[in-house]
Every structure is written in structure tokens, then in C-alpha cells.
Image (cartoon, rainbow, N blue to C red):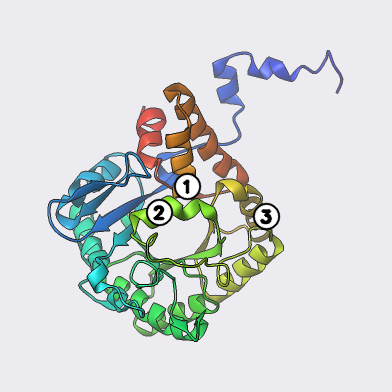
Amino acid sequence: MKFPSTRLRRNRKSEWSRRLINDTYLDKSDFILPVFVCEGKNKKQEIKSMPGIFRYSIDRLDEIISRASKNKIPAVAIFPLIENSKKNNKGTEAINKNNVVCNAISQVKKLNKNIGVMCDVALDPYTSHGHDGLIINNEIHNDETNKILIKQALVQAQAGCDIIAPSDMMDGRIGLIRNALEKNKFFNIQILSYAVKYASNFYSPFRDAVGTSSTLKSDKKTYQMDYKNSDEALLEVKLDLDEGADFVMVKPALAYLDIIYKIKQKFNVPVFAYNVSGEYSLIKNGIKSSLAKEDIILEVIYSFKRAGANAIVSYFANEVIEKYLSK
């Protein structure tokens, strides 16, 4: 194949021709929408570091769930802001059957029984120290943390959660949670493992949203992955699949496209990408031109699909669907 007989630009010459040869497609069904919830009544609080993103009290959830339903988004992911008075060093509010997450699950199902509900299993929103696990002798204790994570997962399942999503990065928790779900006859509850969650600096706006920025006094490098590693990610995925995960998550997504690709190629299982808060805020706050901003959003979302992601957890979900996929 030599020039001039081969001219690749011929296939790019017009919009209709480019459409014909696209090899990556984006659909409304590719998104999971993160939803922040808070306690109280009649609250809709904009998160300063994430323009256009809000926390909702339970009685205001109809606004965001109606929009997600209209846009045919398959599932929402619920993240809580817990009042400081309810936080302690053991995160016991996480296993309260009437906590804000459990109440949000019930409300979402009332608003749309056909939308999927995903909930994180981790203690960081509930602990006074902001870590995902229990601190014993100045370290995050893996096995003792797993005991409370099991209870948290069961509480969420009982409330009607469809997808249990352990994001804590404790070793062995997937198998323990799967066994507990089976024992309690929650046979059809899916587990989305945050199998590959890096100790990233891209989480800062999210920590503002769930109220852990001020409480977290140290980093999470002893349990979240080192961003210099990639082979370790494949081992994490294999272990979690062996323990009973239905699908796996890579978080963050944009700086780890190679990891998404490697996982998809090696395991050929459903891989989700978390387009995290820092990625969202960099575009929203850092790009001045509205036209460029819109193009960049779509470019970033397509990169996840091109790398092999089946679904994308993204704060851009409604925006992308309404601007590009609603026709």
C-alpha cells in the first residue's frame, strides 16, 4: 500500500464518510450517573469545586432522577455527605439501616423502579478520620475492616441496592461480601469491584463533595494502588473475578487508559471506567472556551470507549447525552 494509490484522507473527506467508518460508538446506555445525597429537607447544594454538580436531600432527588430517566441512563451511583455528628472512628453509620444512602436507594426505586442503583462499600464518608477502613495501631486494618464492609453491603442489599461496589481496596473483601450475599439469599445482587483504584490526586473535588477533605489527615497509599504500577492491576482484577465480582472498575480513567485496555484484552470481562471528579473539574474550570470545552468532553469520553470500557461513571453523563446523543 503506497501513496498515491492509498490516500487515507479520502475516507475523512466528508462528515457522512467519517460516520460510515467509525469503529467506536457511544450510546446513552454506556453511562452511570453519580448522584450525591445529603441529609435534611429541601436541599440542593452546588459543590463549589464541581460546577453544575449538586448534593440533593432525599425529597429533592426527583429532579436528578427524572433527568437521568429521561436521558435513559441505565444506572445511578449514590454517594453520601454524612453529618459530622454521625461520624466516628469506626464508621458505624455505614451499617445504619436508616442512613441517608439506604433512604436514597428506596427513594430512587420509588421514582423509577427500572433504573439501576449502585452504592459504594467503603467507610470514608462515615469515619471521623476520612479513611476507607478501621485504624488499629496506626494502620488501616484489612481484616477488621472487612467485617464491617460485609455488614455495610448487606444493609445496602436489604434497602434494594442492585450493584454493590466495594471501593475500599481491602484484600479479600469481594469473596467475603459475595459469600455473605449468597448466605442471605441475595443471589442476584451484582458486585462491581473497584479492583483497580489508584492512590490518585484526581479525587480532591469528590472528597469535598462527601465531606472528607477536612477530616483526611494522611494519604491512602497503603491500600490504594501505586500509580507507577500496571502489572499489579491485572493481579487485582484476577483475584476479584475469582472471588465473585461480576465486573470491575478502573479509577481514575483518563490517566489509566492503558490499564483499561490491558484488562479488557486479558480478561474480556465488563470493564467500567470512572471519569472522576478531578477530571471533570479540570475541564469545567480549566477550559475557557465553551466550544472547546464541549469538544474536549466528548473527546475524553470516547477515549474510555476506545480503550475498551463497557460503561463510564461520569459527571458529564447528562450533558453528553443531551448535547450529542438525544437526537
Q: Mark 3 points at which residue?
A: 262
Whole-Å distance between the Cαs marked 1 and 3?
23 Å
Q: Mark 1 points at which residue?
A: 278
* Residue nearest the viewer, comparing 221 with 120: 221
Taking the image as shown, residue 250 lies to the left or right of residue 110, namely right
Q: Label 1 near label 2: C-beta < 8 Å?
A: yes
Above or below for 66 versus 250: above
Disc 3, SS: helix
Residue 7 at x, y percent in the picture:
76, 16
Picture residue at 70% right of the left edge, 17% below the top: 9
Residue 282 at x, y percent in the picture:
48, 40
Identify the amino acid type marked 3: Lys
Above or below for 95 versus 75: below
**Label located before the other in sequence (2 or 1):** 2
Identify the amino acid type marked 1: Gly
Whole-Å distance between the Cαs marked 3 and 2?
27 Å
Q: Residues within 10 Å of mark 3 (few under 14, many from 20)?
A: some
Disc 2, SS: helix
Picture residue at 34% right of the left edge, 59% below the top: 210
Which quarter of the image is occupied by the N terminus? top right
* Residue nearest the viewer, comparing 136 with 67: 136
Q: Which mark is residue 206?
A: 2
**Label located before the other in sequence (1 or 3):** 3
